[in-house]
Amino acid sequence: MAESFIHMDAGGIKIEGLLENLPGEKGVVVTHPHPLYGGTMHNNVVRAVAHAYREEGYSTLRFNFRGVEGSEGRFDNGVGEQEDVKAALAYMSGIGKKHVDLAGYSFGAWVNALGLEQYATVERVVMVSPPVDFVDFTFLKKNPKIQLVIAGSRDDIGGYKGIEEMLPSWNEKALFRVIQGADHFYGGYDEELTDIIGEFLRRSA
């Protein structure tokens, strides 16, 4: 089954997304890296995350934050973007997905973390390279929904040592995986990233 373009309403702003709707009630919403640095839903890491979930039978929805490509509005420094995430989660609920994960890469992981208390329908959170060396993450309180965090050993935006220090305050039971050799952009490491997420989904099924 191929992905299809959809549109969602985020407080009067039209947001575009790519949905692959598989049978069943499991789904994932995937958020992309920083819009001001070229981040879109077509990013290689976003595609890899969606692919990992799709392989395990999850419906996938990735979308462009406001102001990116065909999505209306303008960049809102993580505030309005939380409304975009809400719209995507509401869309998944609307098509019958009752068990939904929220996965984000870099800026997307930060936006997901910012709004986590508001995202009541989310069952689990996956964070790929949360940019702890680029933005402040001290706001993030302990939350059992945070279950998988991935970083590259050569990442200088989401450095694994900083994540390792913060992780106990997010969820001490979360699985933390470091991909040796990968930098923030995961060039050449997409498959390893997909494998880690696939293994996590199978173990927690």
Image (cartoon, rainbow, N blue to C red):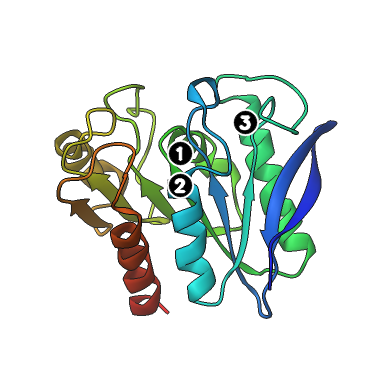
Q: Which residue is mark 1?
A: 113
Where residue 23 sits: x, y (%)?
68, 80
Mark 2–mark 3 Cα distance, whole angstroms, equals 20 Å
Q: Is residue 81 left or right of residue 161?
A: right
Where residue 193 sits: x, y (%)?
32, 57
Q: Residues within 10 Å of mark 2 (few under 14, many from 20)?
A: some
Q: Earlier in the sequence, mark 2 or mark 1?
A: 2
Q: Which amino acid type corresponds to the residue marked 3 in the rendered image?
A: Glu
Q: Which amino acid type corresponds to the residue marked 1 in the rendered image?
A: Ala
Viewport quadrant of the C terminus: bottom left
Where residue 130 sits: x, y (%)?
35, 37
Q: Residue at x 29, y 29 (%)?
A: 132
Q: Quadrant of residue 157?
A: top left
Q: Residues within 10 Å of mark 1 (few under 14, many from 20)?
A: many
Q: Residue at x 46, y 39 (%)?
A: 113
* Residue 48 in sight here: yes
Q: Residue at x 44, y 54 (%)?
A: 125
Q: Which amino acid type corresponds to the residue marked 2 in the rendered image?
A: Asn
Q: Which residue is mark 2?
A: 44
Q: Which residue is mark 3?
A: 81
